Image (cartoon, coloured by chain):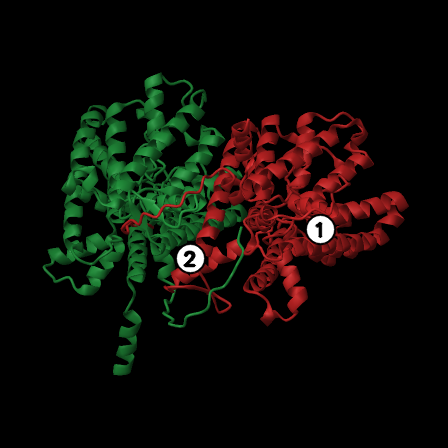
Chain colours: A red, B green
Amino acid sequence: MTLQKDKVIKWVRFTPPQVLAIGFFLTIIIGAVLLMLPISTTKPLSWIDALFTAASATTVTGLAVVDTGTQFTVFGQTVIMGLIQIGGLGFMTFAVLIVMILGKKIGLKERMLVQEALNQPTIGGVIGLVKVLFLFSISIELIAALILSIRLVPQYGWSSGLFASLFHAISAFNNAGFSLWPDNLMSYVGDPTVNLVITFLFITGGIGFTVLFDVMKNRRFKTFSLHTKLMLTGTLMLNAIAMLTVFILEYSNPGTLGHLHIVDKLWASYFQAVTPRTAGFNSLDFGSMREGTIVFTLLLMFIGAGSASTASGIKLTTFIVILTSVIAYLRGKKETVIFRRSIKYPIIIKALAVSVTSLFIVFLGIFALTITEQAPFLQIVFETFSAFGTVGLTMGLTPELTTAGKCIIIVIMFIGRIGPLTFVFSFAKTEQSNIRYPDGEVFTG
Amino acid sequence: MTLQKDKVIKWVRFTPPQVLAIGFFLTIIIGAVLLMLPISTTKPLSWIDALFTAASATTVTGLAVVDTGTQFTVFGQTVIMGLIQIGGLGFMTFAVLIVMILGKKIGLKERMLVQEALNQPTIGGVIGLVKVLFLFSISIELIAALILSIRLVPQYGWSSGLFASLFHAISAFNNAGFSLWPDNLMSYVGDPTVNLVITFLFITGGIGFTVLFDVMKNRRFKTFSLHTKLMLTGTLMLNAIAMLTVFILEYSNPGTLGHLHIVDKLWASYFQAVTPRTAGFNSLDFGSMREGTIVFTLLLMFIGAGSASTASGIKLTTFIVILTSVIAYLRGKKETVIFRRSIKYPIIIKALAVSVTSLFIVFLGIFALTITEQAPFLQIVFETFSAFGTVGLTMGLTPELTTAGKCIIIVIMFIGRIGPLTFVFSFAKTEQSNIRYPDGEVFTG
């Protein structure tokens, strides 16, 4: 029997990427089962729509095949909120918390899992990071819910107002983009409180915990790590360029900014500029936007936000590393240098692997959806980029998806959330080979 | 006055990339002026259409805003043929030939230009390569024209038949995709001679002169250079995958393969599989193809064919280097190894620079065209990829382009032909800096 037991133990030994992938998968399945319960829904829900909603919540995407506000009871909406919270902070964070609450010791293997989940360079201090991360997130969400309730309670009454405030605060901080209202946040397009609170939440959630803690600890820009400097400058520059682009392209569009007052035009341009990276709320109708803005939004959704954050996409730092190493090459420089720091080959090749794998997954998704769906090509492209970046914006295709289309989007959201590398690593057998080969000459370009 | 003269000489000293870019530009301008001559056209031609046609011919793309067969006289068509020949072999080849015919010595600077134009690693033997390249191309084109004339003379008579044979042989070898017939080669969809001769020509022209001469010199696969091995295996595998994909996706499509006999289905699948890399002839109507096939064709057009060839795109070797280095990274390997040769960092970073710059140019093109054109998004995307890869396939958008749209396509064809790196290098001031910076830590992905 011992042989049998060894075999089982050997089989059970998963690599960290495999544990993350399986953990996420199980969270989605449990969520779908909960959403199928009668107490969760106001009307019958098919298994595929339950699975889709659970996947969309756990991957903090926000694409909705059914209207969250009317299809689900408060219990159902609470299940969705729970899935968003787990998906946003990562199920490893919750696993570690549960183990800590049960008073159990956290072994080396679990610490390696957390290191992988939070994309940390070293294993030291990861458990401390989990505690701080959890407390920090909960307190931000509660404070934001309180501020939102000042706005929503007068409109919806105490219980619905408070619930809506909490729901949207959790949905925003975790960059989920789920809303209880069918027109998302379009009725608050010019509302300063909602605009500021919601965007503050998803930018903070999306910029990454390592950046947040670095800023809180060191306070002065000069003392920040290179990663933090890149994230802060990159976020600022990209948001400014995006806001200007949306403002110019949509200024006279009757379907979006055309009829708004100048101040509301600015709020809406700001909101639609930052939401694609990867929050997914909208205060304008993306279905009526000009194609130029849509194409620009594709790029923003693909870039995403920060590493070890509640956001996805290839990550802003990946985009910056690729951009700066290409510019350095084009200027004939031997090295890539940013903020007087040289970026070494392993970081560049990882950024390359992330981007190429991501492009390949998006390309396959578009290719598959053009076969399964009868929809305009731009809607298919937009839906695929939105699913991969776990953004949740749509041009209206989600409710029209075929069952096959829903399955494809679920897979893309799943890969988008755990990250293309973690996904591939959970399959790839890594082999070290010590044979050295002579250099090969290949003409490219 | 001497100061003035020095200034002029200093101003005149261009870098090799600048000479290539300017040379191409002047060839296009001269071509456009020739096409505006009354003896070139059967009916008046606007300056933008003359510029577009000249640019399309010189960049061996084949996108046509006017019907080549009816708009131009034989003189005009001969001008187009000349532009295709110069564009295909590179105007440097012709410049060197003219200098040789005039009996002048070819200085170091010109040799460096040829080395840059033909993407050769060293300067040795480039002039010899030019002579062989020219003679080889002309003889292949003449032989192919003779074979085609066996098919076309009975149908069009001696003079038109011979002229059409020569025109299509030159257009095919140089991967231009220009045709004298409004339906391109659709009336020869099942014709073995036309299918074989045309595809042989554009595959040979597209695979690259360094590969052709290596194969002719060394004969046995084992003795080929790494570059040649990659090009041959890559071309074979990609063509096989592409043919299978087109065959499966279009098999029952009434607009393309649906009504054809099985043998013609195979010919048409083969033809449509190889033409996107970057010939541009078509024996099926791309406007009636399924979106899945169109999306797959985008990838083929972007990849293109061989370095130092009559084709464009990012080049097959660039695609292979990126793919293999990402796979090596995902399998945890320290080095990228292909055919027992290790691919060093400088080659990978150049491949990265080519791909990222190309993606950026295609993205900007799509973004600009969605603003200037009122056309379905997929047609715009297809046109942009086709222009960048100097393929020449279209879903019907080219004749409908606005003047602004025509200018955008001209710029994209130009950059696509001289290559994104040469284009950027003709602007970028390369600076060497000997300062070494400490390594920076950035979390990506």
Q: Do the dots labelled 1 and 2 sit on one chain?
A: yes
- What amino acid is at disc 1? Phe
Residue B90 location (% of width, % of height) = 25, 51
Q: How many labels does the image show?
A: 2
Label 2 crowd (10 A; few <14 / some 14-19 / many >=20): some
Query: Residue A360 appears at what percent x and percent y?
Result: 47, 40
Residue sitting nearer the eye, B375 or B74: B375
* Residue A219 image-quadrant placement: bottom right
Quarter-of-image position of residue B254: top left
Q: Using the image as rendered, state which of residue B335 and residue B321 is in the foreground.
A: B335
Mark identifier at residue A345: 2
Q: Give SS at disc 1.
A: helix
Is residue B253 something one can see in this rendering?
Answer: yes
- Residue A157 makes an appearance in the image: no
Question: Which mark is drawn over residue B26?
Answer: none
Q: Quadrant of the N terminus of chain A?
A: top right
Which chain is disc 1 placed on? A
Q: Nearer the viewer, residue B249 or B333?
A: B333
Can you say whether B185 is above or below B22 in the image? above
Q: Name the residue under label 1.
A: A173
Residue B394, percent from left and from top? 41, 37
The mark lying in front, picked from 1 and 2, is 2
Marks 1 and 2, Cα distance to the nearest angstrom? 34 Å
Q: Identify the secondary structure beneath mark 2.
A: helix
Is A284 situated above or below B258?
below
> Which quadrant would residue A32 be assigned to in this image?
top right
Q: How crowded is mark 1: few (under 14 residues within 10 Å), some or many (20 or more)?
A: many
The chain letter under disc 2 is A
Q: Which residue lies furthest to the left in this view?
A: B103
Quick check: marks 1 and 2 in contact, CB under 8 Å? no
Disc 1 or 2, which lies upstream in sequence? Answer: 1
Q: Which amino acid does label 2 sit on?
A: Tyr
